[in-house]
Image (cartoon, rainbow, N blue to C red):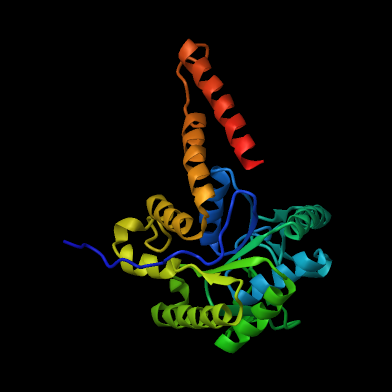
């Protein structure tokens, strides 16, 4: 008896290996996948601007990375007594404005250098809804609890999404692009508007995959909607995925995107992670010292395999 509808993701025509660098930008779902890749030894960088939701904010952030453009004082707002950037999430905040600018500039420089050597860029779109400041018509990545009447809220069309992302794919040259739509629902937009938003994202991604041979779509949204329908796969807010569900999506992504050699290495990296996660009751015991020796041996073996 079948208990759910399986989504056949197939195998990606573009493959990721342990020799690649992968940059992730987008929703919190991008953080979930990238954190698991980093855990198992991949060289990744995730969300150097913090979580980003809409394609326009993602596009603006990528342009800043390509051009190494830092923020300035005009990009900063006050949230209570704390300074924050309109182009970053609340993870980037400081009680002193120049400290915030220096912090975000250092992060930008590091991310721009990472991008120069990046083989693969993964974008996860969460919503087509965008917030633009009325005062200067600038799109913000985060409203930071500013008065609601100071923003204009609108939705990007399918053509507008494609128009913002396509030039960046062209600028990226031979880099591989993995696109996905976040399965996390934006119920603050309303149930109907959330579905319309996801539909626009899916249609835009479909146009991009048809237009570029180096662009691949990973159906994380469809896997969650069809295979993980039950609320036991969600967290307490009934919106974000549980850790177990995120693990399942990561496994599906690994099957979809990793080449055969890297899938074999992944098994060893999982074993290494489990060994390192062991917390001994008696650190001086011969058993634990033996475990440390096996960890060193496994790390040396994996280093040679990757060379």
Q: Residue at x 57, y 69 (%)?
A: 53
Q: Residue at x 61, y 71 (%)?
A: 214
| Res. 69 in view | no
Residue 204: x and y in percent read: 54, 82
Q: Determine which quarter of the picture holds residue 222.
A: bottom left
In the picture provided, is 166 more to the left or to the right than 157?
A: right
Q: Residue at x 59, y 52 (%)?
A: 17
- Image height of 173 relative to 48, above or below: below
Q: Closer to the camera, 189 or 254?
A: 254
Q: Closer to the camera, 301 or 232?
A: 301
Work out which quarter of the rendered image holds the N terminus and state it: bottom left
Q: Closer to the camera, 226 or 252?
A: 252
Q: Residue at x 71, y 79 (%)?
A: 167
Residue 133: x and y in percent read: 69, 79
Q: Count the marks: how many?
A: 0
Work out which quarter of the rendered image holds the C terminus and state it: top right
Residue 262: x and y in percent read: 53, 48
Residue 249: x and y in percent read: 43, 57
| Res. 58 in view | yes
């Amino acid at each position: 008896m079948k208990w759910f509808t399986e989504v056949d993701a197939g195998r990606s025509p573009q493959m990721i290996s342990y020799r690649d660098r992968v940059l992730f930008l987008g929703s919190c779902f991008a953080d979930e996948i990238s954190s698991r890749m980093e855990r198992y030894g991949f060289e990744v960088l995730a969300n150097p601007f913090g979580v980003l939701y809409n394609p326009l904010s993602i596009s603006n952030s990528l342009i800043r990375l390509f051009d190494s453009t830092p923020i300035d004082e005009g990009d900063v707002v006050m949230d209570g007594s704390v300074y924050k950037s309109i182009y970053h999430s609340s993870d980037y905040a400081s009680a002193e404005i120049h400290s915030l600018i220096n912090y975000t500039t250092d992060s930008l420089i590091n991310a721009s250098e990472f991008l120069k050597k990046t083989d693969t860029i993964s974008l996860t779109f969460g919503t087509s809804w965008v917030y633009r400041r009325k005062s200067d018509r600038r799109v913000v990545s985060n409203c930071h609890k500013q008065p609601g009447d100071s923003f204009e809220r609108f939705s990007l069309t399918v053509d507008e999404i494609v128009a913002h992302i396509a030039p960046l794919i062209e600028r990226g040259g031979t880099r591989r692009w993995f696109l996905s739509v976040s399965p996390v629902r934006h119920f603050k937009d309303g149930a109907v508007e959330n579905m319309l938003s996801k539909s626009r994202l899916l249609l835009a991604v479909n146009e991009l995959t048809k237009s570029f041979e180096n662009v691949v779509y990973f159906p994380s949204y469809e896997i969650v909607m069809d295979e993980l329908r039950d609320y036991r796969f969600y967290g307490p807010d009934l919106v974000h995925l549980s850790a177990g569900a995120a693990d399942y999506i990561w496994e599906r992504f690994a099957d979809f995107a990793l080449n055969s050699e890297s899938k074999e290495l992944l098994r060893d990296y999982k074993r290494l992670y489990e060994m390192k996660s062991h917390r001994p009751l008696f650190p001086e015991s011969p058993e634990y010292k033996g475990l440390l020796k096996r960890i060193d041996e496994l790390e040396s073996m994996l280093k040679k395999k990757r060379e």
